[in-house]
Image (spheres, rainbow, N blue to C red):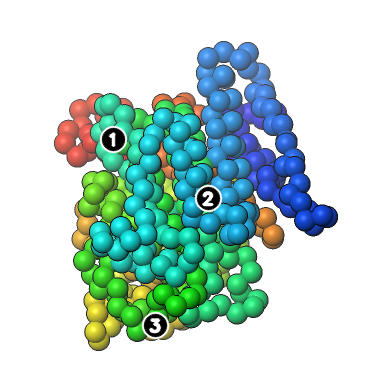
Amino acid sequence: MVCERSDAFASACALARAFPLFTHRSSASRRTEKKSVMVEFFLLGQDNGPVEVSTLQCLTSATEGVRLAARIVDTPCNEMNTDTFLEEIKKVGKDLGIAPTIIRDEELKTRGFGGLYGVGKAALHPPALAILSHTPDGATQTIAWVGKGIVYDTGGLSIKGKTTMPGMKRDCGGAAAVLGAFRAAVKQGFKDNLHAVFCLAENSVGPNATRPDDIHLLYSGKTVEINNTDAEGRLVLADGVCYACKDLGADIIVDMATLTGAQGIATGKYHAAVLTNSAEWEEACVKAGRKCGDLVHPLVYCPELHFSEFTSAVADMKNSVADRDNSPSSCAGLFIASHIGFDWPGVWVHLDIAAPVHAGERATGFGVALLLALFGRASEDPLLNLVSPLGCESDDQEGDLGRDSKRRRLV
């Protein structure tokens, strides 16, 4: 592949999306060998000095992350269940020298993760919360990426129809993207504390399945009346972002999820939807998307008008809106934010990638490049610095003190 250095990142990630790794053949019911596609990068007018070598390493890490995410999303649930996904997390952890923290099954219930446990308790393979943590010396802030990892979504007892259920293996796209991005970010030298939080469950049907009318106590301490078991992603993410806030002490929380079908109506097939409590980060997400090719467009952030959609007579809130015509994708994101609090002083960003996570029948690895570009200023890698929209002006302000100094590179 030949390209200018300034365009290399987006071009490399686009190329990675074009060569999916997962395939089956029906003949003799045997798994085919994965086609190995060799991708080589060349930079125009460069002499392969230290900067150019670093650029090539960055492109390699990014494309490997994109293809890892796409492979996980393409793999069906009879192979990519929660146990298998945990093995993928462990492999990445071993590669990076990081031992994951794993909370699963009955321990989730005991420790108060009522959202995640309630969604996954009916499945053969139990739900899990897994965390990979990168904590380098000299870190000045803590960032958490929280991924929705529903390995299959039947809708639960509010079951999906025969035309809407196929393709629900892709409901783990957020967690897959977080895993691919975390691997690449750490490989390229991430200077701040970075936690990847994976909320893994299969939303299945069985004797132990959550029922509409059930009330769950979530990790935030808030109670949720279930009025739609097919609105499960927000439940697992609510526990995930609350854990990132309370236990990991995150200053910045990004949750990524294939959350709502309405996202594809709101922002289309090619743009993810962003909802955030920060106008600056909203703009940064849009710019990062244009830099890397994972396009993003904002949703309306207005909790004072929209959060009343979740009003419950018997609990702190319901899990699904009263009026599905009232900005449902925004409302779904607000449900997640409510479990860290609308007055939380940190930065919260919600990315709904339901539509762009796939193109036709294949996964795209969407989200990996977006996270790498968005947080490029926290990387030691010069190419990621170049494509990041954040921190450009404040990097030169050496006199910043206190919180301004703490957030210097990213805001």
Give the foreground label among 2 and 1.
2
Percent coordinates x, y for residue 382 in the rendering: 47, 26
Q: For the residues marked 3 and 1, what is the alpha-carbon distance in whole angstroms? A: 46 Å
Single out the mark in the foreground, 3 or 1: 3
The crowd level at tag 2 (other Cα within 10 Å; few <14, some 14-19, many 20+) is some
**The quarter of the displayed image where residue 398 is located:** top left
Residue at position x 69%, y 31% from top?
Answer: 39
Residue drawn at x 24%, y 80% as measured from the top left:
315
Residue 233, image x and y in percent? 43, 65
Residue beneath the point at 62% across and 65% down: 167
The percent position of residue 308, horizontal first and vertical second, equals 29, 79
Q: Which amino acid does label 1 sit on?
A: Arg
**Above or below 241: residue 315:** below
Earlier along the polypeptide chain: callout 2 or callout 1?
A: 2
Write the residue at 46% across / 40% down: 90
Callout 3 amino acid? Pro
**Looking at the image, residue 128 lies above or below residue 395:** below
Looking at the picture, does residue 51 appear above or below residue 25? above
Q: How far across and down, in percent of the image, does residue 375 sit?
A: 41, 39
Marks 3 and 1, the one that precedes in the sequence = 3
Mark 3 or mark 2: whose residue is earlier in sequence? 2
